[in-house]
Image (tube, rainbow, N blue to C red):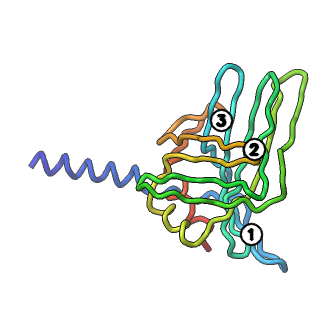
Amino acid sequence: MNNKIILALFLLANLNAFSQKPCEIDTNVTDSLGTYKSTKQFIIFERSFAGNSTNIFFSLANSNGVLSLETQLLKRSSGFIKADCFDTNSRIYLQLNNGKIVTLLYVGNDTCGTLIQNENSPNSRIMTGSFVFSKENYEALKISPVTFMRIKFAGETIDYPFKTEFTAELDKKTYQPEYYFINYLKCVEN
C-alpha cells in the first residue's frame, strides 16, 4: 500500500515538473500585410565572471506562417567588448537530449550589433538576429530537451551549455532553458 502511494506521488510530481508553461505573448498583430505573433523574451543563457557578463535571450515568432527564433545577445564589460557578428553563414546548432542536432539558419542582414558606452556603467554590446526552423527539425524540438547550443558567428563559433534550471542575476526569475522549446513552441504554431 505504501509503495503505491509513493509511486502515485512520484508520478504526480513528474507530471507537474514536465507540464507545459502558459503562453506569454508579447505581440499579436493581424493587418493587411498578414499576421505576426511573438512570445515574450526568455533568458536562455547567463554567464558572469570577473566583471564581464553575457546574456542570451530567446523569443519565438510566427510571421505569416514562418516560424523563427528571435535571438538577442547582451554583453557587458568595463573593458573592451569584442564584436561577434551574424552573416549569411551564421547558424544556431541545438543539441537535444535524444542525441539529435537541430540547425537554425540566420535570415537577416550582416550585423555586429550596437556598442553602447557610458561613463558611469559598463560598456554594453547588443546584437539581435532571426533564425528560421525547417519543418524536419522543428518537430524534434517539441519532444526533447535542449542540452547544448553552438552559435556560428561570422568569425568564430562559440558553445553555450544549457542548464536545467537557474535563477537569473538580471531579473531574479527562475528559468528552465532545456525545456524552452517544449514549453513555448506551441504558443506560436498557429
Farthest bottom residue in view: 32
Find numbered disc 3 in the image and state the secondary structure of the residue it sits on.
Answer: loop
Closer to the chain start, of discs 2 and 3, is 2
What amino acid is found at the position of numbered circle 3 in the picture? Asp
Where, quadrant-wise, is the C terminus in this rendering? bottom right
Mark whose residue sits in front, 2 or 3: 2
User: Where is residue 139 shown, x and y percent of the image?
Assistant: 51, 68
The residue where tag 1 is placed is 36
Q: Quadrant of residue 99?
A: bottom left
Q: Is residue 31 left or right of residue 105?
A: right
First in sequence, mark 1 or 2: give its number.
1
The spot of residue 78 in percent (x, y) is 80, 22
Residue in the foreground of this view, choosing between 179 and 135: 135
Location of residue 90 by image quarter? bottom right
Discs 1, 2 touching: Cβ within 8 Å: no
**At label 1, which amino acid type do we have?**
Tyr
Q: Amino acid at mark 2?
A: Gly
Residue 171, numbered circle: 3
Q: Secondary structure at mark 1?
A: strand
Q: Is residue 28 left or right of residue 45?
A: right
- Residue for point 27% across, 53% down: 11
Residue position marked by numbered label 2 in the rendering: 155
Tag 2–tag 3 contact (CB < 8 Å): no
